[in-house]
Image: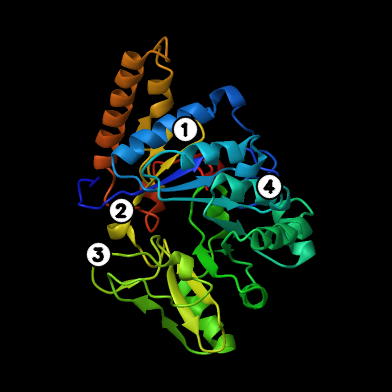
Amino acid sequence: MLDQYGRNITYLRISITDRCNLRCKYCMPDEVTDVGMKNILTFEEIWEIVKAGVSLGITHVRITGGEPLVRKGCADLIRGIRAIPGVETITMTTNGVLLRTYAASLKEAGLDGLNVSLDTLDFEEFASLAGRQNLKEVLDGIQAAKEMGLPVKINAVNRKELNPISLVLYAQQEKIPLRFIEMMPVGYGKQYVGRSNDELRACLEDEFGKSEMIMYQANQKKQVSEQISHMVQTLHTKEVPIGSGPAVYYKFSKLTIPVGFISAIHGKFCESCNRVRLTAQGYLKLCLCYDKGIDLRQILRGGEALQNEKDIQKALNEKLTTAMRDAIYKKPAAHCFEHPEEMTEINEMVKIGG
């Protein structure tokens, strides 16, 4: 569906838990507590929301957390989403700690790809940053996903202390696309905002040669490279950057992998934003900066009885769909990260959904 600014909203990010098995300083330090399972959407409730979203034009679903793999039955949730007609892709963002355990079941359930968060390859720095000594498990999880044939991308947050060179060399070695994400001033992240992605790209050019944006022509499925072929979509506009999300990919002259940059602060992409977020507690969030949205859990648990009766289920679905349509239409024009005093969102990122 189109929002009030004519943007086509096709992408729903679903946080399925606010729990995590790491304690990254910029996201979820030890003092952050979870809200309890009774306040988290059930799988059945998530499926109902996805069905309503699909009826409004949602085609891409991303599973996030917290850490989604700490929630029991995550693969079952994905299997249920895969069974919903109209869902084209299901992907997941994970810290990778439990990925070796679940890679096979995720593949079998119908997951289309993974983004693995990895901010450092130094074991001591990882332990300091994440509060846990799980770097080996993350690297093993990446290998397990590759072995299962799950497309993997690495996400690294462009924080003040980032050492990007080792991450690029690792991604090159493993033939995995790498994306750098500008730190957003949300929750604890305000303390770790680093240089812009433009500055980072210039730094990488000193090491890996001249960079050039990777483009392809609309209405063509062009295999740009083996590593990113799964990201190439058929689009209906003029020449556009690779991918359906906000990352802009570059090819460096000394690298064979694509390097992406998600520049929320210094490369504002709000005019093409195609997504909304669903928090673990069922709040449909329209923009990271603002608390605008609607509580879908309240609709789902609003006293409707005998959920198995078709007429009541139909009425509930209509109410849910109408609420989502009205909310999405009012999606704000743009974020205000450059003016943090205008932000109305006060929750930590883990409460919003990464």
The tag on residue 46 is 1
Which of the two labelled residues, at mark 2 and mark 4, occupies the earlier sequence position?
Answer: 4
Q: Residues within 10 Å of mark 4 (few under 14, many from 20)?
A: some
Q: Given this view, does label 2 or label 1 mark the residue nearer the observer?
A: 1
Q: Secondary structure at mark 3?
A: loop
Q: Look at label 3 and name its amino acid.
A: His
Q: Secondary structure at mark 4?
A: helix
> What residue is shown with label 4?
102
> What residue is shown with label 3?
236
- Callout 2–callout 4 Cβ contact below 8 Å: no
Q: Residue 199, can we see it?
A: yes
Rendered-image quadrant of the N terminus: top left
Depth order, front residue of 123/51: 51
Which of the two labelled residues, at mark 2 and mark 1, occupies the earlier sequence position?
Answer: 1
Q: Look at label 1 and name its amino acid.
A: Ile
Q: Residue 17, can we see it?
A: no
Depth order, front residue of 254/308: 308
Which of the two labelled residues, at mark 4 and mark 1, occupies the earlier sequence position?
Answer: 1
Answer left or right for 306 relative to 9: right
Residue for point 60% across, 41% down? 75
Q: Look at label 2 and name its amino acid.
A: Ala
Q: Secondary structure at mark 2?
A: loop
Where residue 36 appears, as percent x and y from the top left, is 61, 26
> What residue is shown with label 2?
334
Where residue 316 appears, as percent x and y from the top left, is 34, 20
As drawn, 291 above or below 247: above
Q: Disc 4 and disc 3: Cα gap in Å?
A: 36 Å
Q: Residues within 10 Å of mark 1 (few under 14, many from 20)?
A: many
Q: How many marks?
A: 4
